[in-house]
Amino acid sequence: MAAPESRSLELELPAVPQSVPRARRAVVGVLDGLDVDLWPVGVVVSEAVTNVVLHAYRDGEPGRVRVKVSMEAELLTLVVADDGIGMSPNPDSPGLGVGLVLIERLVEHMEIHSAGGTRLVVRLQLLAEAA
């Protein structure tokens, strides 16, 4: 794969459902023109931003979600962060609780920092699409 030296993106969006596809399109757009499998990238972005929308802000006021992408060679680093309540159980959650498990299965590395909000850092090795 002939990847440029680096590509990057920083995006801040409201933590509302409409931001999920917007973030996914923006991140996938960073990879435009590369012969890589975009499916895992799209799933990881969608799951991570959805988690912010559903869990980060429980007071009724939507907060913000920040998405940062950097790519060096064939390694994509994605950071999804919020200033919400941090990670804590929510018995009223509409989700099934599989988002982080799915993300972890699709990436090479995952870190979660939960102090003053939540910050998810993942690294994906970009693979060429199968013909």
Image: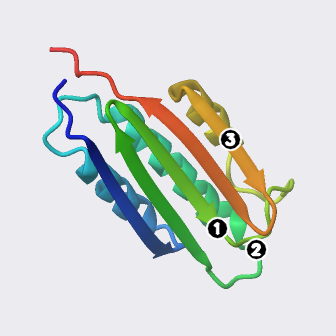
Percent x, y of residue 23 = 39, 60
The outermost residue toward the front is 5
Name the disc covering residue 58, or none: 2
Q: Residues within 10 Å of mark 2 (few under 14, many from 20)?
A: few
Q: Residue at x 79, y 56 (%)?
A: 114
Residue named by callout 1? 82
The outermost residue toward the top is 131
**Image vertical order of residue 117 relative to residue 94, above or below:** below
Q: Residue at x 63, y 50 (%)?
A: 120
Q: CA distance from mark 1 to mark 2?
A: 13 Å
Q: Residues within 10 Å of mark 3 (few under 14, many from 20)?
A: few
Q: CA distance from mark 1 to mark 3?
A: 14 Å
Q: Residue at x 17, y 29 (%)?
A: 35
**Image vertical order of residue 87 relative to residue 37, above or below:** below
Q: CA distance from mark 3 to mark 2?
A: 23 Å
Percent x, y of residue 122 = 56, 40
The mark nearer the N terminus, 1 or 2, is 2
Name the disc covering residue 9, or none: none
* Colour scheme employed for the rendering of this structure: rainbow
Closest to the camera, between mark 3 and mark 2, is 3
Give residue 54's quadrant in the image: bottom right
**Observer-nearest residue: 67 or 77?**
77
Give residue 71's quadrant in the image: top left
Residue named by callout 3? 111
The mark nearer the N terminus, 1 or 3, is 1
Q: Amino acid at mark 3?
A: Glu
